[in-house]
Image (cartoon, rainbow, N blue to C red):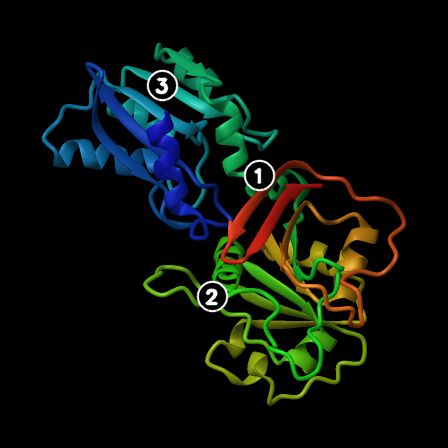
């Protein structure tokens, strides 16, 4: 199952709005086939594992299938994997996380057991569930998982002094920020950030392929946004959406209806403050730079309550620290 989890992680940033799933076929204590879900609308992990085993010259019948998520049991964009398991006469199924969809949870287990196939579940369930927190949230709530990202100094400032380097954080931290973009299927900013910084909001990671440019979302009250901005004039301009005179909470709900399941809010401070006040932030990703600047504005405005995190990780990135945690 640990190998299946490793395989599932290969789908980070590529499978949304589908889950990341890894699968391994085992016979006699040895792996005979493995695979992972690579992109929404394409073959599931179980299909790749069976195909891999056959390419290697192995017989699938009677083998044990380890998969990080309960196999699908209904027709979607692809046939259900339970049909594959029955057709290939797989001998046993072990899965980590139960399908988060209340309509499907446990359905595969019941179907396979009825057909006489032994099924076990819950192996490394915590790790399997953590892998798809954003998908699980979206499939149940129909609202995207929201990550609040910002770079700030030790004194909580987000703007460097006039005449100083425009970059608050190190090159390594900026690359890590692109990893956050890679994990997302939409990146959201306020109109003031769009005007002031003229960002591209693109994923720029050398050698990384296979991902569609995340949607670029701009919130504006006035609608006054220059068409010369990169967001409206570069080659990804058709991936930019503007929401005017809508609250952030309303916008996030609308994005969920568009099957956007993971949103990265990149700022500025006013948008992040609104997100925390509205209670829509699921995860925090704060880059903390070793600098004291004393500039205006602060990263956030006054909040209605203290936001406390759990499952917190502090990751060194260049000269900075990335703090990630769940709200």
Q: Is residue 213 left or right of residue 151?
A: left
Using residue 4 as the reference point, say whether residue 250 is left or right of it.
Answer: right
23 vs 289, left or right, is left
Q: Residue at x 44, y 41 (%)?
A: 20
Residue 19: percent from left, percent from top:
48, 41
In the image, what residue occupies the spot 60% across and 90% down?
A: 228
- The tag earlier along the polypeptide, 1 or 2, is 1
Q: Report crowding for label 1: few under 14, some 14 to 19, many 20 or more residues within 10 A (C-alpha).
A: some
Q: Nearer the viewer, residue 169 or 63?
A: 169
Residue 283 against residue 257 in the figure, above or below: above
Q: Is residue 80 something one can see in this rendering?
A: no
Q: Residue at x 58, y 44 (%)?
A: 314
Is label 3 in a helix, a strand or a loop?
strand
Q: Quadrant of residue 67?
A: top left
Position of 326 relative to 190 (above/below)? above
Which residue is labeled 3 in the image? 93
Q: Which residue is mark 2?
A: 203
Q: In the rendered image, which quarter is residue 151 located in?
A: bottom right
Q: Dot 2: what SS?
A: loop
Earlier-in-chain disc, 3 versus 1 = 3
């Amino acid at each position: 199952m640990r190998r299946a989890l490793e395989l599932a992680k290969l789908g980070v940033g590529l499978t949304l709005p589908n889950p990341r799933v890894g699968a391994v076929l085992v016979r006699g204590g040895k792996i005979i086939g493995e695979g992972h879900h690579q992109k929404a609308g394409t073959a599931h992990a179980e299909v790749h594992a069976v195909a891999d085993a056959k390419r290697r010259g192995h017989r699938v019948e009677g083998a044990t299938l380890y998969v990080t998520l309960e196999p699908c049991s209904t027709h979607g964009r692809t046939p259900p994997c339970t049909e594959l398991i029955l057709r290939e006469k797989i001998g046993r199924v072990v899965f980590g996380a139960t399908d988060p969809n209340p309509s499907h949870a446990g359905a595969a287990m019941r179907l396979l057991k009825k057909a006489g196939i032994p099924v076990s579940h819950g192996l490394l369930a915590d790790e399997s569930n953590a892998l798809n927190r954003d998908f699980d949230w979206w499939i149940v709530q129909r609202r995207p998982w929201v990550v609040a990202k910002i770079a700030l100094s030790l004194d909580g400032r987000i703007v460097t002094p006039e005449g100083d380097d425009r970059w608050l954080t190190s090159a390594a931290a900026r690359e890590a920020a692109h990893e956050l973009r890679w994990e997302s299927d939409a990146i959201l900013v306020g109109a003031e950030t769009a005007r002031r910084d003229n960002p591209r909001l693109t994923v720029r990671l050398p050698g990384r392929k296979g991902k569609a440019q995340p949607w670029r979302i701009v919130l504006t009250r006035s609608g006054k946004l220059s068409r010369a901005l990169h967001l409206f004039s570069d080659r990804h301009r058709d991936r930019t959406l503007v929401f005017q005179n809508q609250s952030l909470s309303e916008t996030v709900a609308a994005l969920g209806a568009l099957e956007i399941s993971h949103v990265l809010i990149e700022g500025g401070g006013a948008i992040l403050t609104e997100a925390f006040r509205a209670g829509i932030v699921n995860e925090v990703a704060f880059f903390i730079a070793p600098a004291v600047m004393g500039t205006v504005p602060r990263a956030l405005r006054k909040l209605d309550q203290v936001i406390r995190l759990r499952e917190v990780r502090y990751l060194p990135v260049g000269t900075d620290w990335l703090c990630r945690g769940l709200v």
